[in-house]
Amino acid sequence: FAYVEQPTFVGFSLHVIVARTQLPRVPLAALSAILNSRRAKNWFETIAKRRGAHLDISGAVLKQFALPETSPPNLVLGLESLARNWANFADELQLNLLVDQIYGD
């Protein structure tokens, strides 16, 4: 999953998530970080259909993924920062720690 802030061209085989409200429960940058987490990966591997070596994450499957009920602002800011400035493996470890904290793990 990728987060972009500028108009972007994508092919037909991609899903695009657009915020429909000014204050979504989870900001889009934080959402992209959550969807790139170990928690989401494990969930998608269990729920989504396999298509060859890859997963077919349809819109219907994506809608089933449970988002956190509440998101502490400091953790959301951390996820947004990672989504905008991804640099290395250490960022992936930090992302997983933040997502686990948001979900109460």
Image (cartoon, rainbow, N blue to C red):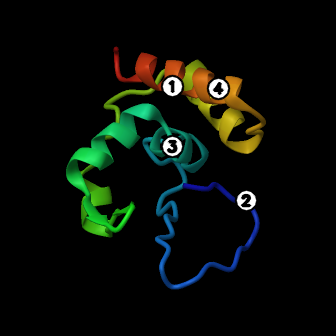
Is mark 3 in CB contact (under 8 Å) with mark 2? no
Is mark 3 in CB contact (under 8 Å) with mark 1? no
- The residue closer to the viewer here, 12 or 24, is 12
Q: Amino acid at mark 4?
A: Gly
Q: Secondary structure at mark 4?
A: helix
Upstream in the sequence, badge 3 or badge 4?
A: 3
Is mark 2 in CB contact (under 8 Å) with mark 1? no
- Distance from disc 3 to disc 4, alpha carbons, whole Å, reads 14 Å
Q: Pointer 2: what residue? A: 5
Q: Quadrant of residue 42?
A: top left
Q: Secondary structure at mark 2?
A: loop
Upstream in the sequence, badge 3 or badge 1?
A: 3
Circle 1: is it few (<14), some (14-19), or many (20+) Cα within 10 Å?
some
**Residue visible at 48% across and 39% down?**
34
Q: Quadrant of residue 90?
A: top right
Is mark 4 in CB contact (under 8 Å) with mark 1? no
- The residue closer to the viewer here, 83 or 71, is 83
- Up the image or down, 81 lies above or below 23; here it is above
Q: Pointer 4: what residue? A: 78
Q: Amino acid at mark 3?
A: Asn
**Residue visible at 66% across and 41% down?**
83
Circle 2: is it few (<14), some (14-19), or many (20+) Cα within 10 Å?
few
Residue 96 % position (x, y): 51, 25
Locate residue 93 relative to residue 14 in the image: left or right.
right
Q: Secondary structure at mark 3?
A: loop
- Distance from disc 4 to disc 1, alpha carbons, whole Å, reads 11 Å
Upstream in the sequence, badge 4 or badge 1?
A: 4
Q: Amino acid at mark 1?
A: Asn
Q: Pointer 1: what residue? A: 96
